[in-house]
Amino acid sequence: MKCVTPASPIHERLRLELQRRIVSGEWAPGDRVPSEASLREEFGVSRGPVRQALAALRTAGLISGGQGRQAVVLDGAVPQPFDAFLSFTEWTRATGRTPGQRTVELARRPADAIAAGRLDCEPGDPVVQVLRVRTADGVVTMLERATFIWEAGRLLLDQDLDSASIFDTLRGHGLHFVRARHEIDAIGADATDAAHLGVPVGSPLLRERRVSYTPDGRAVEAADDRYLPGLTSFLIENSSHNPVPLTRGAAS
Amino acid sequence: MKCVTPASPIHERLRLELQRRIVSGEWAPGDRVPSEASLREEFGVSRGPVRQALAALRTAGLISGGQGRQAVVLDGAVPQPFDAFLSFTEWTRATGRTPGQRTVELARRPADAIAAGRLDCEPGDPVVQVLRVRTADGVVTMLERATFIWEAGRLLLDQDLDSASIFDTLRGHGLHFVRARHEIDAIGADATDAAHLGVPVGSPLLRERRVSYTPDGRAVEAADDRYLPGLTSFLIENSSHNPVPLTRGAAS
DNA sequence: CAAGTGAAGTTGTATAGATAAGTGGCGCCG
DNA sequence: CGGCGCCACTTATCTATACAACTTCACTTG
């Protein structure tokens, strides 16, 4: 009899098991994580996968560690899966709330220079733009401006975007995302933001601009999401040992 | 004859060499990275270090890759060292600008409940608070509110903060930071922000709240930095393959 | 000419063993 | 009783090998 997820490699299953023990409280913050040798023996695997699993937990900020120093459980935030960063729907569900949406606009139009640059296509190429108000538990949270290349966007034109998740739709057509680049800054609300988010023009919004890529490196979606302040924030763990691809730069 | 940095392990030196080839343009975006076997032969090392170096470049967003698919150079942003995220001075210099500062306030006072919670100490414990306006090439960029536990803050009381970097000072006393937690959101300027940044009350600011930790896990600095919009943004690379400790959550 | 096949190349994963380097604790000695 | 040094334990790094899974491309075949 086969397991339900026979494809997942050993180190991944190991990481999930250890993560479960941490978030379930079985291993409390401050406890010492068993040594690599113990884990090797307990799970009957080689040292490689054990180290991979521990390294993943360390970059996630769940445990500490260092040469000669046994790892200790930290009181970090629970890590979110990659999908939770691409899809408002996934994120809202992952945090135990109910996502909602109201589509303001869904249009096919030629790409302007900015969108073309971000999506790595030619200005004038057809793209699909979506403007949606997103809610969590009925509370207006964010205004989403998303631009898709034609190959992906055309799949959305005949969809009821008020009831389906865009990412579920694209996934159903075999379009997966494996990489994304996020740029976060603050901006004053413009007339459109103000009208749909119910705030005065110029009031502060948290902006996340994102470009999502498929496995073969093509940019498929460029988003400009604007969050109402006080409801949402971004959390990043950082360490000299396991650097994360985080950059503070000049605004573009 | 010994190399200047004989301590750095092979995979690290390998990563730096490959990174140099990428940022120098020797390998242009779109080029295919040599296969692991080629690199193994060229540098005369085993496959392990090669894979570690490539993995580091992948999490930094410099190259792509996947099972069976040869890696390709991406047009990513140059990664910043860990220190550039703790010190405005380091960051400004790393981006080729000249840092400046004007200290508004430097005071010892008892910790309030919020600071105590973030620094993991008792309310009423003495802490040192610094309020500084930071400039880059003479342009007002950010208002920095930093709170230090007494052990670190007392080292700053007799310093001329307008000329020295706080982190250089602390480093000189053996206080190193190896881990930090950043929370990023947007907020309207309060009266203090408005006065020192030269904007109206309520205008949008990008806020970064940060707690920095020493190797033994003690919180030493809690900062609340507020950036003028349009000058600064945060960039994060994200992939399903190499997840980063990034969380989108409810604002605290 | 299009579609399917298969081989070669490449990356992902796992195992085993060896050495280096750092931590922590224990006991010895002053 | 305090300080110092030694030693067991743990983690970091590197090597070598093997197999699995995937991509790509040339080639065959209908």
Image: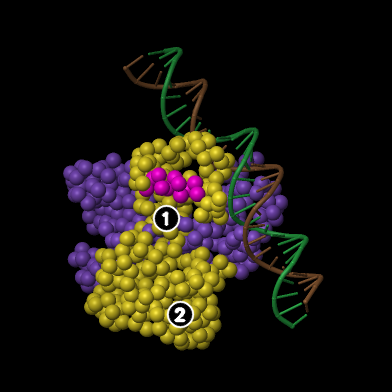
Chain colours: A yellow, B purple, C green, D brown
Which residue is nearer to you in this view: A45 or A126?
A: A45
Q: Is residue C10 above or below residue A114?
A: above
Spatial CA distance of label 1 from label 2 is 31 Å
Residue B41 vs residue B79: left or right?
Answer: right
**Residue type beneath disc 2:** Leu
Instruction: Residue A32 in the image: state x and y as whole percent.
Output: 40, 37
Q: Is residue B227 visible?
A: no
* Of A38 and B123, the residue lying toward us: A38
User: Is residue B36 among the parts visible in the rendering?
Assistant: yes
Mark 2, residue position: A156
In the rendered structure, the residue with mark 2 lies on which chain?
A
- Magenta stretch, overall SS: helix
Residue A131 versus residue A164: which sits nearer the camera?
A: A164
Magenta residues, as a range? A13-23
Q: Residue at x 32, y 60 (%)?
A: A96
Quadrant showing the N terminus of chain B: top right
Residue A22: within the magenta?
yes
At 28% across and 53% down in the image, what residue appears?
B146
Q: What residue is at 31 percent from the left and 49 percent from the top?
A: B221
Indicate left or right for B76 with B136 as reference.
Answer: right
The residue sitting at 54% across, 71% down in the picture is A174
